[in-house]
Image (cartoon, rainbow, N blue to C red):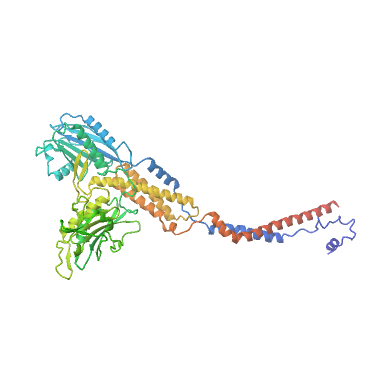
């Protein structure tokens, strides 16, 4: 109390006891830390809460291999994927022909037909030529390992290539070249037989078998050297490499296969007017006999499932007119866009198809009694032999007329389509199915050099056609996979606050792994394995891109997040920071006053 009274009474005599005291610049007591401690504690509580706030708004992002995605895209764009193909040409009955010259001329013809371009899905080929003279002595030039595949001289006889023996010739050639398609790629052979035809004509027959062999037979072929070389080159490029199609590259959606690698074949029997007649079918029997081999052959390319249904009261949308000359109702090709009645034909009832599966509709339309018989008239005025048509990427339609179009009674007749008629219908459907995949439905390939007969396969597709599908499908899948992953990579990097779950990261990783496996299998000549791996790569990439966690959340930037939270925290945080700074400034001023007083005291 004595110090306090002296400080409060400046008139008191303190000479000799204390130095002169200035209340504006000095203080005799040490400043307290209570106010500074409270404000500092509040400030640090806010600072300690910032990590918890940041954690509460943090977005989980599974790491994606952006570098591997860019590497895959660059590799596919810069280096087109090519498959190893071994071409073997055998000339039988040629007495004085140089195999090295033949090989050089055939290679020049192949390069000319392929325009020297290295396109994805094409063949990285090697050519072997064997010349067997009439005495069954051989001279050859080989580019493949003779220990794994070699032609046994004299095995092919000229008299076995006759008219009506095509299936037997195809089987014998498959036995001759069995084991030649291995890890180094598929082997395709063309046998040229210089012989006298059985009928004595000068016709040259060219046949492409159902496996990987073709043959050209005729007399005087040695004198037609240029034509023979051109035909051999054309078979290798136009048929075995390109599948007999005009296009040799992939444009858009090359095949009717869903992004998940699935195809649903939906077969529908439509009774236009059940008041006239009602037809049913024994579809299960046809499925097991005719469709099962097709789905098994295409298993590496797509997972195919088959469904069937019978619908009633399904009139068509277009009109038909009576033709007195043909004694039938006709509809023309100009009516085809309006034939399918999407309002009455409830076809999309598949329960086994997911959102990205491809559904191909195959419809058997039974006309009503008022327009029976009903036929499709072609632009040239002729009646269509199949009485059907296709719609690309949708399916096909066949108009089936009952055997008797006369309605005898008021009550509708109930019947079942005979097994023979149903077999014919399914065969037409298989031809339409081939057209949807880009192949021709007829068993001939015509070019400027002549016509080639193509032996049909009971599986719907020959082995060399399946090879073409595998090569093209692999390329399309890898290109689609890299495009999808590239889009996902750019999307994720452009949105820093996008949620990326571990499941998406795993799908991307496995998609890249499957794509690399497909490329490796393709370089080794594994057509089926590369197609299966590429299908898996594309499916996983699509699953990652369309993952529900990506599609169902709205994403915003850091600036947006700051704008949302700043009105709640900035006002309070600003006052706390200003109070802490003001208290710290006050404490330093008071401490300076106290130190000044101590200095004066020591000096006195």
| Res. 238 image quadrant | top left
Coordinates of residue 211 in the picture (x, y in percent): 21, 45
| Res. 175 image quadrant | top left
Depicted 340 relative to depicted 518: above or below: below
Depicted 200 relative to depicted 534: above or below: above
Depicted 107 relative to depicted 337: above or below: above
Coordinates of residue 514 in the picture (x, y in percent): 36, 48
Pick whichever, 123 or 185, lies toward us. 123
Pick whichever, 433 or 503, lies toward us. 433
In-image side of 75 versus 14 (left or right): left
Q: Residue at x 23, y 48 (%)?
A: 440
Pick whichever, 481 or 5, lies toward us. 481
Coordinates of residue 43 in the picture (x, y in percent): 65, 59
Q: Residue at x 65, y 61 (%)?
A: 42
Depicted 38 relative to depicted 465: above or below: below
Pick whichever, 582 or 150, lies toward us. 582
Q: Which quarter of the rendering shows the N terminus?
A: bottom right
């Amino acid at each position: 109390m004595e110090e306090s009274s002296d400080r409060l009474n400046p008139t008191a005599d303190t000479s000799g006891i204390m130095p002169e005291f200035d209340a504006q610049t000095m203080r005799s007591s040490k400043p307290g830390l209570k106010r500074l401690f409270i404000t500092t504690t509040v400030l640090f509580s806010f600072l300690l809460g910032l990590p918890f706030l940041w954690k509460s708004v943090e977005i989980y992002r599974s790491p994606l291999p952006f570098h591997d995605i860019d590497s895959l895209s660059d590799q596919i764009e810069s280096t087109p994927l090519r498959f190893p193909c071994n071409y073997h040409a055998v000339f039988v009955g040629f007495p004085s022909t140089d195999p090295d010259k033949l090989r050089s001329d055939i290679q020049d013809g192949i390069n000319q037909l392929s325009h020297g371009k290295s396109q994805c899905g094409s063949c990285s080929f090697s050519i072997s030529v064997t010349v067997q003279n009439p005495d069954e002595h051989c001279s050859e030039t080989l580019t493949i390992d003779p220990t794994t595949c070699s032609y046994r001289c004299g095995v092919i006889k000229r008299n076995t290539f006759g008219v009506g023996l095509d299936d037997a010739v195809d089987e014998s050639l498959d036995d001759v070249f069995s084991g030649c398609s291995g890890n180094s790629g598929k082997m395709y052979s063309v046998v040229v037989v210089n012989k006298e035809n059985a009928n004595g004509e000068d016709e040259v027959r060219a046949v492409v078998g159902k496996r990987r062999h073709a043959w050209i037979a005729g007399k005087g072929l040695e004198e037609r050297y240029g034509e023979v070389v051109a035909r051999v080159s054309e078979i290798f490029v136009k048929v075995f490499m390109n599948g007999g199609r005009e296009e040799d590259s992939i444009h858009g959606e090359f095949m009717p296969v869903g992004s998940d690698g699935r195809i649903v074949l939906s077969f529908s029997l439509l009774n236009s007017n059940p008041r006239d007649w009602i037809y049913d079918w024994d579809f299960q029997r046809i499925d097991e006999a005719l469709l099962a081999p097709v789905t098994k052959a295409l298993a590496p390319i797509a997972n195919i499932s088959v469904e069937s249904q019978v619908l009633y009261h399904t009139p068509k949308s277009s009109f038909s007119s009576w033709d007195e000359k043909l004694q039938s109702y006709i509809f023309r090709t100009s009516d085809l866009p309006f034939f399918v009645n999407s309002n009455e034909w409830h076809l999309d009832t598949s329960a086994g198809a997911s959102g990205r599966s491809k559904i191909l509709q195959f419809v058997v339309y039974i006309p009503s009694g008022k327009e029976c018989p009903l036929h499709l008239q072609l632009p040239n005025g002729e009646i269509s032999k199949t009485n059907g048509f296709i719609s690309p990427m949708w399916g096909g339609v066949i108009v089936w007329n009952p055997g008797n179009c006369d309605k005898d009674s008021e009550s509708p007749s109930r019947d079942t389509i005979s097994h023979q008629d149903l077999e014919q219908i399914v065969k037409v459907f298989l031809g339409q199915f081939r057209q949807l995949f880009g192949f021709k439905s007829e068993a001939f390939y015509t070019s400027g050099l002549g016509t080639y007969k193509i032996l049909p396969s009971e599986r719907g597709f020959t082995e060399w056609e399946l090879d073409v599908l595998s090569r093209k499908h692999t390329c399309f899948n890898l290109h689609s996979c890299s495009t999808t992953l590239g889009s996902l990579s750019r999307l994720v990097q452009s949105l820093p606050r996008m949620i990326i779950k571990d499941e998406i990261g795993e799908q991307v990783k496995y998609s890249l792994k499957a794509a690399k496996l497909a490329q490796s299998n393709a370089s080794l000549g594994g057509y089926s394995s590369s197609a299966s791996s590429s299908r898996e790569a594309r499916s996983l990439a699509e699953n990652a891109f369309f993952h529900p966690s990506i599609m169902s959340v709205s994403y915003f930037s850091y600036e947006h997040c700051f704008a949302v939270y700043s009105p709640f925290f900035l006002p309070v945080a600003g006052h706390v920071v200003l109070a802490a700074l003001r208290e710290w400034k006050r404490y330093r001023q008071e401490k300076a006053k106290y130190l000044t007083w101590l200095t004066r005291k020591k000096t006195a």
